[in-house]
Amino acid sequence: MKVVLPGGTGQVGNVLRRSLTAAGHDVVVLSRRPSGAHEVAWDGRTPGDWAGELDGSDVVINLAGRSVSCRYTADNLKAMMDSRVESARVVGEAISAAVRPPKVWLQMSTATVYAHRFDAPNDEDTGIIGGSEPDVPEYWSYSVDIATAWERELEKADTPRTRKVALRSAMVMSPDRGGVFDVLSRLARLGLGGPVAGGAQYVSWIHDQDFVRAVEFLVARDDLAGPVNLAAPAPLPQRALMRALRSAWGVPVGLPATKWMAEIGALALRSDTELLLKSRRVVPGRLLAAGFAFDHPEWPGAAGDLVGRARSGRRP
């Protein structure tokens, strides 16, 4: 297949690019700063010569969007919104204009679209879309607005010959440098990987190999369209997630952090506490119902595999 990855230079893009290339597919990355073979320039906002890569392709997987690992200032939140909405819009326009449009368009979305909750998991049918929620910072609702606006561009794109899927992805755990697993591992190995603000908030995650397998599954299944949760079936409280990660690294103790300590840590890392404190309890209802089987459904086993790969330097 020919697979086009708009915005495919980040952690998730690298995971997909390696695996799809290793499987023999022709992978083309659209990037604002192309730097190698099979990378084509685009700005993520306006039509251009890059659109020719989509015409005649088999699959488009749009990953473009400003990283959420930043301080949630007004300017950064606007950049997150604009980069996602504009890239989804222009990809839809290119597919609509193509003589030979791709069979499927997988549009990255996020599990952050769901409400902050502890009582029950969110799946695609029974999950609660977040918004104005009590007892959480007001700006958290803007993250939900970003997710819904992102998916709205996918829905309204006029692509009758192209099946569309919104990938409501949890955190993709891979041993790549700078990814979320790498950051959590550094904290654990320094003895700082204890519960944050009590650690009762749920963490949803997916092993990188299951992420790739789920993408391949969705490409192959012509009967699946619309939002699909890409998350392992066993989300768990943050304190349990870090305990298992410490165990995998052989670190016996992890110092706890209060909410104000988390604020200081997030400031030092130029990130935001929403990534630490929002309870994301998301399960893959549609994937499981369609028969997808996870290779890494439970976090302790997944953490052990990822730690082993990180130690050996293996990325794929």
Image (cartoon, helix red, strand yellow):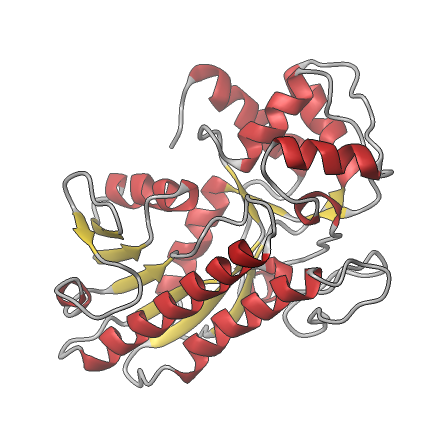
Q: Is residue 13 above or below residue 169?
A: above
Q: Is residue 194 above or below residue 28?
A: above
Horizontal and vertical percent position of residue 276: 71, 43
Q: Is residue 86 above or below residue 188?
A: below
At x 46%, y 72%, the residue is: 224
Query: In this rendering, does residue 241 appear at all?
Result: no
Quadrant that contains the N terminus? bottom left
Q: For the image shown, how many numbered marks are present on the structure?
A: 0
Query: In this rendering, does residue 28 appear at all?
Result: yes
Q: 113 or 208: nearer the eye? A: 113
Horizontal and vertical percent position of residue 157: 36, 81
Q: Quadrant of residue 53?
A: bottom left
At x 59%, y 66%, the residue is: 289
Horizontal and vertical percent position of residue 7: 33, 53
Quadrant that contains the C terminus? top left
Q: 18 or 302: nearer the eye? A: 18
**Position of residue 41 in the picture relative to residue 117 (left or right):** left
At x 61%, y 49%, the residue is: 232
**Position of residue 204 in the picture relative to residue 5 (left or right):** right
At x 61%, y 51%, the residue is: 72
Horizontal and vertical percent position of residue 36: 17, 38
